[in-house]
Amino acid sequence: MTTDVSGESLPGRYPRVAGPTHTIAVLAVLGGWTFWQKMRMDRLGAGADLHRVRGYVIAICFEWALFAVVLAGVHLYGGSFRIVLGERWRSAREVWRDIGIGIAFWLVATGLLALFGWLLRIHGNNRAITAMLPHGALEVAVWIALSVTAGICEETIFRGYLQPQFMALTKSAPAGIALSAVVFGAAHAYQGFRMTILIGLYGAMFGSLAYWRGSVRPGMIGHAWQDSLNGVLAAVMRH
């Protein structure tokens, strides 16, 4: 996530934020979570009623737990939270600037995702994904909480933590962004192969934004807004 500084050595440009063992553990946990989600989605696709609110709450708890594990690993290693999260907001102007960047990113990303989705021939008729979206007011409220959680936690985990780790491993910003995007797509493999590719491309967009901005905060805003809007629109369209 750190921006390019000419004249610095490669290790200085791409420092680790945590130890390799910790990163391997985080990847293993993500793999286990993806496998569990795949089993759940298979049951949803078969018409099973798995109680959406309960599923949302479990996902919220998991993401915050992994968020805490990531930050704990960074702290114990002596890594920089500035690299993981970016510089703190120091004024309302900076807050509004990142909100504006997040909204602009969402608009551009939405158009690109529509194009990529068309090229990949992705249609909105996946029974399991449709069944996962909220229906009533309570489900919408919990879904929004899940969306905000995903925006904060996933941007921190994938773009703030894994991306710098991959950059440090490869000594390359593009490679780090690409590897983080691949893991992000793979973590959503339960949505199907084509959706995995599309989500990986989405992750690359977020990764590029985080690297350019030097912060995950605009991505958090765009991510949370996108996920929230999807759930709200799905609930509205049912009525």
Image: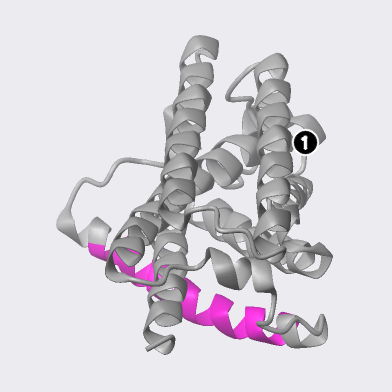
Say left or right for 232 vs 84: left
Task: In the rendered view, tell whether residue 230 sits above or below residue 47.
Answer: below
User: What SS does tag 1 mark?
Assistant: loop
Name the image quarter holding the C terminus. Answer: bottom left
Say left or right for 32 vs 170: left
Nearest the viewer among 96 and 229 is: 229
Nearest the viewer among 215 and 65 is: 65
Residue highlighted by disc 1:
171
Amino acid type of the residue that numbered disc 1 sits on in the rendered structure: Lys
Is residue 109 a member of the stretch shown in magenta?
yes
Q: Position of residue 76 (x, y in %)?
A: 50, 10
Q: Residues within 10 Å of mark 1 (few under 14, many from 20)?
A: some
The quarter of the displayed image where residue 199 is located: bottom right
Please identify the residue farthest to the left as the structure is shown. Answer: 92
Q: Position of residue 25 (x, y in %)?
A: 69, 21
- Name the residue located 17 percent from the left edge and 52 percent from the top edge: 91
Q: Which residues are magenta?
A: 96-116
Is residue 92 a member of the stretch shown in magenta?
no
Res 190 seen here: yes
Predominant SS along the magenta part: helix
Please identify the residue farthest to the top as the structure is shown. Answer: 76
- Name the residue located 47 percent from the left edge and 32 percent from the top edge: 67
Name the image quarter holding the N terminus. Answer: top right
Q: Position of residue 234 (x, y in %)?
A: 46, 79
- Name the residue located 65 percent from the left edge and 85 percent from the top edge: 114
Q: Position of residue 9 (x, y in %)?
A: 70, 30
Coloring scheme used = one colour
Task: In the rendered view, tell whether residue 108 sits above or below residue 167.
Answer: below
